[in-house]
Image: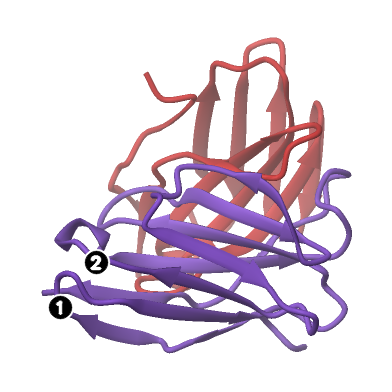
Chain colours: A red, B purple
């Protein structure tokens, strides 16, 4: 079993919809949680970064971390066709350097 | 703003050949990370360097080696290439040791194809 689980999708939504993307993890020691967006054949682009539990909002994006449930979410409001990409969650243990990534969820926002 | 630069962007090699991938971190970033992403897979951590010293090691094959130079750029050397090494290789950089939660910023990747 992978340390970080993420539904690969694809997830298709109409333009303007609220999108919910999720990851679950098994290691309760993860402290840092990130969401990256990756367009085809491009490098991952950081969207949100959260330390420990709680919510964080940035424009149309909201990240939530629920450490008690080992569950993180990314919400995208008023989704746009330009949001169509693969969304990767990533996590890191305190005291280590490497990120553990989820497999990514492919999102398609239909105009 | 300046981003992570990787070269070459595309590389085609034959089995048993050697390849060298280069990474130039964001200015003033002193930590470099290498990841390998196979088709349809998540990025897998290979190795990282802080201040020219190896700081962490992941699933990097013994055929691969890497180093960080005095100007903080890094090179990933891959020898005896195998078909399974075909992947997208990402470099990321951060400022600081990376242990305090500094965010990793990714480059565009080098796409390696081994024939």
Q: Which residue is drawn at 42% across and 57% down?
A: B36
B74 lies left or right of B36? right
Q: Mark 1 lies on which chain?
A: B
Mark 2 closeness class: few <14, some 14–19, many ≥20 residues within 10 Å: many
Q: Residue at x 53, y 82 (%)?
A: B22
Q: Give the letter of the chain under mark 2.
A: B
Q: Which of A54 and B43 is in front in this view?
A: B43
In depth, the one of A4 and A72 nearer the eye is A4
The N terminus of chain A sits in image quarter: top left
- Residue drawn at x 23%, y 76% is B17
Q: Name the residue under label 1.
A: B14
Is the C-beta separation of discs 1 and 2 under 8 Å?
yes
Give the mark nearest the N terminus, 1 or 2: 1
Q: Mark 2 points at which residue?
A: B81
Secondary structure at numbered mark 2: loop
Q: Do labels 1 and 2 share a chain?
A: yes
- The answer to whether one can see residue A73 in this image is yes
In percent of width and height, residue B13 lies at 21, 81
**Residue density around tag 1, few if under 14, some if 14–19, many if 20 or more, within 10 Å:** some
Left or right of A22, for residue B5? right
């Amino acid at each position: 079993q992978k340390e970080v689980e993420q539904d690969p999708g694809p997830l298709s939504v109409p333009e303007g919809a609220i999108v919910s993307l999720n990851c679950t993890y098994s290691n309760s020691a993860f402290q840092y949680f990130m969401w990256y967006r990756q367009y085809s054949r491009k490098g991952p682009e950081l969207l949100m970064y959260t330390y420990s539990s709680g919510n964080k909002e940035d424009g149309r994006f909201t990240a939530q971390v629920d450490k008690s449930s080992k569950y993180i979410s990314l919400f995208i409001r008023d989704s746009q066709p330009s949001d169509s990409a693969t969304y990767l969650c990533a996590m890191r243990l305190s005291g280590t350097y490497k990120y553990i990534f989820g497999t990514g969820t492919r999102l398609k926002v239909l105009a | 703003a300046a981003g992570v630069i990787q070269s070459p962007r595309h590389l085609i090699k034959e089995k048993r050949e050697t390849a060298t991938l280069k990474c130039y971190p964001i200015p003033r970033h002193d930590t470099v990370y290498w990841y390998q992403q196979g088709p349809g897979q998540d990025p897998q951590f290979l190795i990282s360097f802080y201040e020219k010293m190896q700081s962490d090691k992941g699933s990097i094959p013994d055929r691969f080696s890497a180093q960080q130079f005095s100007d903080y750029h890094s090179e990933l050397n891959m020898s005896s290439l195998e078909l399974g090494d075909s992947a997208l290789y990402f470099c990321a950089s951060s400022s600081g040791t990376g242990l305090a939660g500094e965010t990793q910023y990714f480059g565009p990747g080098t796409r390696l194809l081994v024939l």
